[in-house]
Amino acid sequence: MVNSAHSNVGECCRIFRKHMQMTPYQFLTEYRVCKSVELLSGDLSISEIVRRCGYNQTSNDIAKFKTMMGCTPAQYRQHEKQDKQKSEQLF
């Protein structure tokens, strides 16, 4: 399909980066972390969330999540639960 547009992978990546200010890989990583954050509010296990977000190894997802969010998925989930409990106590 790329050949039919008279372009190559490098050119597609360059155009993507120009318009998105990030590489396709960076975009995918951010998307996966954002999706992980959404799923952490539920009851799925971390391993299941990682699998649903397209990672094959839990350690890869956790490392990328920690880089972007400043904590592990388990820590994030715990903070969210504590914040929810505090807000429920106010009402």
Image: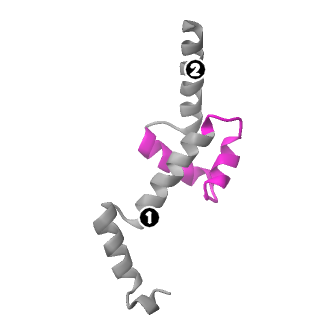
Q: Nearer the viewer, mark 2 or mark 1?
A: 2
Residue 64 x, y percent position in the rendering: 48, 50
Residue 11 x, y percent position in the rendering: 34, 81
Residue at image x 63%, y 56%? 57
Q: Is residue 34 left or right of residue 48?
A: left
The image quarter containing residue 15 is bottom left
* Rendered image: mark on residue 11: none
The image quarter containing residue 9 is bottom left
Give yes or no for contact between labels 2 and 1 (Cβ–Cβ under 8 Å).
no
Residue 33 x, y percent position in the rendering: 51, 48
Residue at image x 61%, y 38%? 40
Label the magenta part by its dominant secondary structure: helix
Residue at image x 57%, y 7%? 91
- Determine the residue located farthest toward the top in the rendered image: 90
Instruction: Determine whether the residue tagged by mark 2 lies in a helix, strand or loop.
Output: helix
Tell me the CA gap for discs 2 and 1: 33 Å
Amino acid type, callout 1: Tyr
Foreground: 63 or 17?
17
Whether residue 48 is in magenta: the answer is yes
Q: Which residues are magenta?
A: 40-69
Other residues around mark 2 within 10 Å, as few (<14) / some (14–19) / many (≥20): few
Residue assigned mark 2: 84
Q: From the viewer's perspective, is residue 6 above or below residue 83?
A: below
Residue at image x 70%, y 41%? 45
Q: From the viewer's perspective, is residue 42 above or below residue 56?
A: above
Residue assigned mark 1: 25
Whether residue 23 is in magenta: the answer is no
Disc on the earlier residue, 2 or 1: 1
